[in-house]
C-alpha cells in the first residue's frame, strides 16, 4: 500500500514537472526554510503562524510588545515629573494588555 502511494505521488510530481507546473514557484532554487523549532510544536499551530507571517499579520501580543518597548524608551528620555507619570500610566496599561494577550495565546495553545 505504501509503495503504491509513493509511486503514485512520484508519478504526479513527474507529470507536474513535465507540464511546467512546478517552475516559477515562490522560493524556487532556494533551500527549504529551517523549521526545526516547529518539530516539537503542534503542526496545525505552526502552519497557522506560518500563514499569518506570510500574510503580514502579527499576533496582538507582538504588536503590544513593540509598543511597550517604545514607551519604555520614551520614558527613559523624559525629565518632567508630570510627563513621567503619564508615561508610567501608559507603560502600566501596555504591560497589562501584553500580559493578557500572552496569557490568551498560551491558554489557546494548551
Image (tube, rainbow, N blue to C red):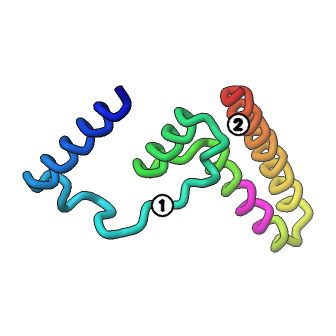
Residue 52's spot in the image, x, y percent?
47, 44
What residue is disc 1 on?
33
Residue 93's spot in the image, x, y percent?
79, 43
SS for callout 2: helix
Which residue is drawn at the image coordinates 16% and 54% (left, top)?
17
The picture quadrant where one finds residue 81 is bottom right
Label 1 – label 2 distance at C-alpha:
28 Å
Which residue is drawn at the image coordinates 67% and 48% (left, top)?
64
State which region is magenta. Answer: 68-74
SS for callout 1: loop
Of residue 22 and residue 95, the one placed in the foreground of this image is 22
Vertical side of 91 occupied by 49: above or below: above
Which residue is drawn at the image coordinates 70% and 36% (left, top)?
101
Circle 2 packing at 10 Å, graded few (<14), some (14-19), many (20+), is some
Vertical side of 81 occupied by 54: above or below: above
Between disc 1 and disc 2, the foreground one is 1
Vertical side of 1 occupied by 39: above or below: below
The picture quadrant where one finds residue 29 is bottom left
Amino acid at each position: 500500500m505504501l509503495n503504491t502511494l509513493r509511486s503514485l505521488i512520484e508519478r504526479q510530481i513527474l507529470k507536474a514537472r513535465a507540464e511546467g507546473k512546478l517552475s516559477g514557484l515562490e522560493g524556487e532554487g532556494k533551500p527549504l526554510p529551517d523549521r526545526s523549532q516547529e518539530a516539537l510544536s503542534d503542526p496545525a499551530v505552526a502552519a497557522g503562524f506560518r500563514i499569518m507571517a506570510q500574510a503580514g499579520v502579527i499576533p496582538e501580543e507582538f504588536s503590544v510588545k513593540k509598543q511597550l518597548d517604545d514607551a519604555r524608551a520614551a520614558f527613559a528620555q523624559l525629565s518632567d515629573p508630570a510627563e513621567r507619570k503619564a508615561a508610567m500610566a501608559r507603560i502600566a496599561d501596555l504591560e497589562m494588555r501584553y500580559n493578557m494577550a500572552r496569557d490568551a495565546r498560551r491558554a489557546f495553545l494548551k
